[in-house]
Image (cartoon, helix red, strand yellow):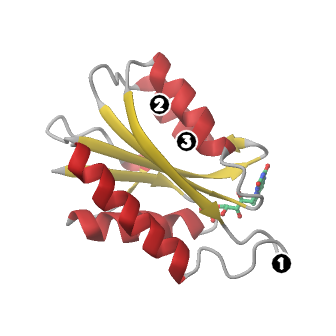
């Protein structure tokens, strides 16, 4: 059993979360009201990128939870697709004792002009592939 938790201000990261959760046969949950399921094999955490950072609620969630001996897979979306959100989440999680199995990030539509149309079908297919690969490491 796996867990998929996300922060998504505009809905882009939610699309990845739903695609990943579907592959895993679970339901994605918003980070705000979520807690870690002690029985989860892998915790998938996803966030958009806001001012070069993951969502504040995601950062807080990582800060307040114990991830020692937890396996975590990360996903994110951003206008520029630099992957800063997943890199920063990975760094914070390592401090909290997590093992990072892998990460996936893609573009996410920002404002009116940037990265329009993302995440698209190809992005979602890649996210599903990522979910299958990660679940084999669980
Ligand atoms: C307030 C705000 C700040 C953002 N800052 C960045 C940024 O620093 N770098 C970047 O690449 N994209 C930035 N973006 C674009 C978002 O990361 C992108 O649209 C992402 O897909 C948002 O995810 P969401 O729809 O799940 O909230 C920003 C978007 C917003 C709304």
- How far apart are labels 3 and 2 at the CA level? 9 Å
Residue at the (46%, 22%) spot, across then down: 94
- How far apart are labels 1 and 2 at the CA level? 31 Å
- Say above or below: 129 vs 66: below
Q: Which residue is mark 3?
A: 57
- Disc 3 is placed on an element classified as helix
In the picture provided, is 51 more to the left or to the right than 135?
right
- Disc 2 is placed on an element classified as helix
Residue closest to the far right: 113
Spot occupied by residue 59 in the image (x, y as percentages of width and height): 56, 34
Rendered-image quarter of ligand 1: bottom right
Q: Which residue is mark 1?
A: 112
Residue at the (42%, 63%) spot, across then down: 17
- Disc 1 is placed on an element classified as loop
Spot occupied by residue 98 in the image (x, y as percentages of width and height): 37, 25
Q: Nearer the viewer, residue 133 or 53?
A: 133
One can see residue 54 in this view: no
- How far apart are labels 1 and 3 at the CA level? 25 Å
Nearer mark to the viewer, of 1 and 3: 1
| Marks 1,2: beta carbons within 8 A | no
- Say above or below: 26 vs 83: below
One can see residue 136 in this view: yes
Residue at the (18%, 34%) spot, across then down: 38
Q: Which residue is mark 2?
A: 62
Nearer mark to the viewer, of 3 and 2: 2
In the picture provided, is 66 more to the left or to the right than 76?
left
Spot occupied by residue 114 in the image (x, y as percentages of width and height): 82, 72
């Amino acid at each position: 059993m796996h867990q998929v938790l996300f922060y998504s201000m505009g809905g882009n990261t939610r699309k990845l979360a739903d695609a990943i959760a579907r592959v895993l046969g679970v339901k994605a949950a918003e980070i705000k009201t979520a807690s870690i399921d002690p029985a989860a094999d892998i915790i998938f955490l996803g966030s958009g990128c806001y001012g070069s950072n993951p969502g504040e609620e995601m950062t807080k969630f990582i800060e307040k939870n114990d991830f020692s001996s937890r396996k975590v897979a990360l996903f994110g979306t951003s206008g520029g697709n630099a992957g800063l959100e997943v890199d920063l989440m990975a760094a914070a999680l390592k401090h909290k004792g997590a093992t990072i199995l892998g990460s996936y990030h893609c573009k996410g539509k920002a404002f009116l002009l940037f990265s329009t149309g993302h995440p698209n079908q190809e992005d979602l297919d890649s996210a599903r592939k990522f979910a299958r690969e990660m679940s084999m490491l669980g």
